[in-house]
Image (cartoon, rainbow, N blue to C red):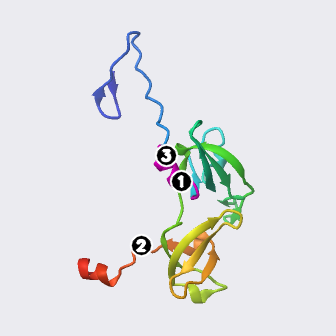
Amino acid sequence: PFCSAVGMEEEEDEWGAIPAAPPPRKPDIETSATLVGHRVRIQALTSRADLNGCYGLAKSYDEATGRFLVEVEGGRWEKRPDGCWAKSTGGGEYKLKWLNLTIDSLVGQRVKINGLKSKDELNGLTGWARSYDIGKGRYMVEVQEGGEQYALKPDNLSAAGCLRTKDWMAAFGD
């Protein structure tokens, strides 16, 4: 038999069966440390498919089980049959494999503020996402100009990229 994925012949065992793929490795300490404390998106769950697409906070990592304790946010945005978007109910804590999580966090990144209505004077400003509060569903952002901090929704932030300093400009140009 041939392996359709890579076009190579697979080896059969002594009973003529093709061995199953090895189980995915558990993340190393460095990988687990990167996820803990960050906002994550849940994906590819089969037993709890209703959680796919939900967001949460990776609170801790259990090395013995290879799972993260994720506190799921209070719901997710879903398109209703009438075409409007509504937030579904949700929440709770779940122990999830790292394969079912992707980092969706701006913590530690430079961000640009946009789409605010109540404090529209902040739109267009940049700052640093210092932390994420799962209870409020907001990032604590320290604005670059003035250093004030604001709790802002993820929808009002985008990654701003690198800060180009005079030294950077001298070394690399525009």
Q: Nearer the viewer, residue 75 or 82?
A: 75
Pinpoint residue 116: horizontal percent, then vertical percent: 61, 81
Residue positioned 59% across, 84% down in the render: 148
| Residue numbers of the magenta segment | 28-38
Asked if residue 30 lies in the magenta stretch, the reply is yes
- Secondary element type, mark 1: helix
Q: Earlier in the sequence, mark 2 or mark 3?
A: 3
Residue positioned 51% across, 84% down in the render: 125
Q: Quadrant of residue 138?
A: bottom right
The quadrant of the rendering that contains the C terminus is: bottom left
**Numbered mark located on residue 29 in the image:** 3
Q: Amino acid at mark 2?
A: Gly
Spatial CA distance of label 2 from label 1 is 20 Å
The quadrant of the rendering that contains the N terminus is: top left
Residue positioned 70% across, 67% down in the render: 136
Residue positioned 66% across, 64% down in the render: 83
Q: Is residue 149 above or below residue 21?
A: below
Residue, disc 1: 35
**Numbered mark located on residue 168 in the image:** none
The reply to whether discs 2 and 3 touch (Cβ–Cβ < 8 Å) is no
What is the count of numbered marks?
3
Name the outermost residue toward the top.
15
Q: Amino acid at mark 3?
A: Ile
Spatial CA distance of label 3 from label 1 is 10 Å
**Numbered mark located on residue 161 in the image:** 2
Q: Amino acid at mark 1?
A: Leu
Q: Is 124 placed left or right of 13 in the picture?
A: right
Q: Is residue 34 above or below residue 164?
A: above
